[in-house]
Image: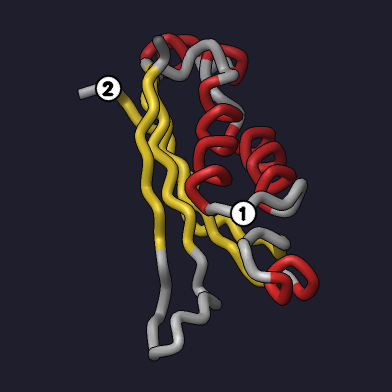
């Protein structure tokens, strides 16, 4: 099993969704990102350049989470995965997008979409 770096609960206000009210008012979105990579070179050398800087990664993911609106959280998840896979050391990324303020017409705490993408 590869090593993993995980960012949980990255939160931002976005305007994603298919309904006009979602686009106009926006809502809270959360994302979890799990990156698979070999961290041994970084650990052996204590060198940040030999791993993924998770502060920098978080800033990039947040920009997507709060950026250009999309209709589907499936699309949002793919865009977040693309950010993760842009790091050459990342072999795979698992993304979960949470939509905690979702209106389903019935009580619900959250809706999530989870995807896993590998470097091809």
Q: Is residue 5 left or right of residue 103?
A: left
Q: Is label 1 in a helix, a strand or a loop? A: loop
Indicate whether 62 appears above or below 40.
below
Quadrant containing the N terminus is top left
Q: Nearer the viewer, mark 1 or mark 2?
A: 1
Asked if the residue at tag 2 contacts the one at tag 1, i.e. Cβ–Cβ closer than 8 Å, the answer is: no
Q: Which residue is mark 1?
A: 71
Q: Residue at x 56, y 38 (%)?
A: 80
Q: Is label 2 in a helix, a strand or a loop? A: loop
State how far apart marks 1 and 2 are (Cα).
33 Å
Quadrant containing the C terminus is top left
Q: Position of residue 61 (x, y in %)?
A: 64, 41
Q: Position of residue 71 (x, y in %)?
A: 62, 54
10 Å crowding of disc 1: few (<14), some (14-19), many (20+): some
Indicate whether 34 appears above or below 88.
below
Q: Which badge, 1 or 2, comes first in the chain's sequence?
A: 2
Q: Which residue is mark 2?
A: 2
Q: Residue at x 65, y 69 (%)?
A: 19
Extreme-left residue of the structure: 1
Of residue 95 and residue 70, the one placed in the foreground of this image is 70
Residue 115 found in image quarter: top left
Q: Position of residue 60 (x, y in %)?
A: 69, 37
Q: Residue at x 51, y 81 (%)?
A: 103
Q: Is residue 86 left or right of residue 40?
A: right
Of residue 113 and residue 61, the one placed in the foreground of this image is 113
Extreme-right residue of the structure: 24
Indicate whether 53 appears above or below 27.
above
């Amino acid at each position: 099993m590869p090593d993993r770096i995980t960012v949980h609960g990255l939160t931002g206000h976005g305007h994603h969704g298919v309904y006009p009210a979602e686009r106009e008012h926006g809502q809270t979105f959360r994302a979890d990102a799990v990156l698979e990579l070999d961290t041994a070179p970084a650990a052996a050398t204590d060198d940040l350049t030999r791993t993924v800087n998770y502060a920098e990664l978080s800033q990039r993911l947040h920009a997507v989470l709060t950026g250009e609106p999309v209709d589907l959280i499936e699309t949002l998840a793919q865009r977040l995965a693309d950010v993760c896979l842009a790091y050459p050391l990342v072999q795979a990324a698992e993304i979960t997008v949470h939509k905690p303020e979702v209106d389903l017409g019935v009580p619900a705490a959250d809706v999530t979409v989870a995807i896993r993408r590998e470097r091809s």
